[in-house]
Amino acid sequence: MKERILRFLTVSTGNILGIDIGTGSVKIAELGRKNGRPILKSVGIIDLPESILQDDANIDSTVLAETIRKAVAASGA
């Protein structure tokens, strides 16, 4: 993973979408390049709904997927 990030920061012309699934929210960050330097193009944060927990150890993957879609839409990525 570290090598992929370093490669992007030195030669890539595309964008990278980062997703952080935390205990209370999903965060999205889109990185791009401008004048050969990495820039933050967009960001989105959506709180995880309480309905995501099915029990103490499992989450509802359908609810998680929908929350990720909402975070991407909120970011404009």
Image: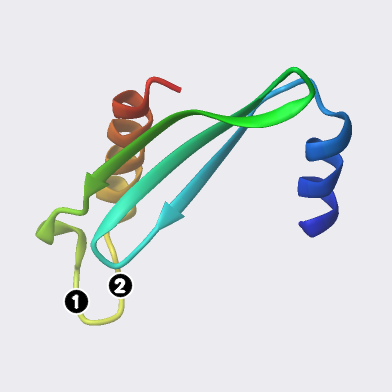
Residue at position x 38%, y 20% from top? 76
Q: Position of residue 13 (x, y in %)?
A: 79, 20
Figure check: 8 above or below 58: above
Furthest-left residue in view? 50
Give the residue at mark 2: 58
Mark 1 vs 2: CB contact within 8 A: yes
Task: Describe the colour scheme in one phrase.
Answer: rainbow
Residue at position x 46%, y 23% from top? 77
Nearest to the observer: residue 32 or residue 51:
32
| Tag 2: amino acid | Asn
Residue at position x 64%, y 26% from top? 32
Q: Is residue 38 left or right of residue 72?
A: right
Q: Residues within 10 Å of mark 2 (few under 14, many from 20)?
A: few
Nearest to the observer: residue 72 or residue 10:
10
Q: Quadrant of residue 73?
A: top left
Q: Position of residue 71 (x, y in %)?
A: 32, 36
Q: Position of residue 30 (x, y in %)?
A: 53, 32
Q: Quadrant of residue 31?
A: top right
| Tag 1: amino acid | Asp
Mark identifier at residue 19: none
Q: Is residue 35 left or right of residue 63?
A: right
Count how many numbered circles sit on residues in the image: 2
Residue at position x 75%, y 17% from top? 35
Q: For numbered disc 2, what is the local secondary structure?
A: loop
Give the residue at mark 1: 55
Screen quadrant of the N terminus: bottom right
Q: Quadrant of residue 55?
A: bottom left
Figure check: 25 above or below 54: above
